[in-house]
Amino acid sequence: MITEKLQNAINGQINAEMWSANLYLAMSFYMDKEGFDGFAHWLKKQSEEEMEHACAMAGYLVKRGGTPKVDKVDVVPNGWGTPMEVFEHVYKHECHVSELINTLVDVASAEKDKATQDFLWGFVREQVEEEATAQGIVDKLKKAGDAGIFYVDAQLKNR
Ligand code: MG
């Protein structure tokens, strides 16, 4: 059985994952409106992935005798500048999420909950990929410049 403290911390992360899902959905809508279908598609998938993270955490809480919660999700920003600015924001946000996950590992460790630490390592690894992927897109956009932006947009449609 999971401790209440750890259950509450995971519920906090479920809320953060849902907020991330909304952030990426808002970015997807924005890119769609700006005429970048590929970026919009990639961000929509990213949003769906964040919702899957929230559900995986909820499923884990149930398995451990805890109670997952859907809480009020704060409003997300909307309206960005260039696609580069959008993806720089994605990168910055993923770095922030990595910190949240690391803090959650610390809570699991303080609660001496080995199973939860093990469960969370998957997310620690996932964040390495998330940061690298977002940074990779920023780098690509930098190299592409104005002329190559539609090429990168077309590439991201394949996600
Ligand atoms: Mg996530």
Image (tube, rainbow, N blue to C red):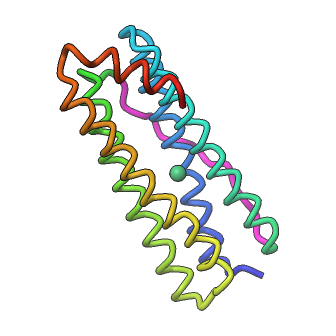
Out of 142 and 9, give the one closest to the viewer: 142
Please state the total of marks drawn on the protein image.
Answer: 0
Q: Residue 8, how many percent across, how many down?
A: 61, 68
Q: In this orientation, which residue lies closer to the viewer: 84 or 71? A: 84
The magenta stretch spans residue 120:
no
| Residue 127 image position (x, y, % from top left) | 45, 58
Q: Residue at x 25, y 29 (%)?
A: 141
Choose top left, top right, bottom left or bottom right for residue 68.
Answer: bottom right
Q: Position of residue 49 (x, y in %)?
A: 59, 42
Is 108 placed left or right of 130 in the picture? right
68 within the magenta span: yes
Q: Residue furthest bottom?
A: 112
Measured along the vertical axis of the image, is residue 45 above or below residue 135?
above
Q: Quadrant of residue 11?
A: bottom right
Q: Position of residue 114 (x, y in %)?
A: 64, 86
Residue at left 70%, top 56%?
56
Please state if 3 lies on the left or on the right of 46 as rendered.
right
Prevailing SS of the magenta stretch: loop
Check the picture and name the quadrant holding the N terminus: bottom right
At x 80%, y 65%, the residue is 62
The answer to whether 69 is drawn above or below residue 29 in the figure is below
Give the residue drawn at x 36%, y 47%: 93
Question: Which image quadrant: the C terminus?
Answer: top right
Q: Which residues are magenta?
A: 66-78
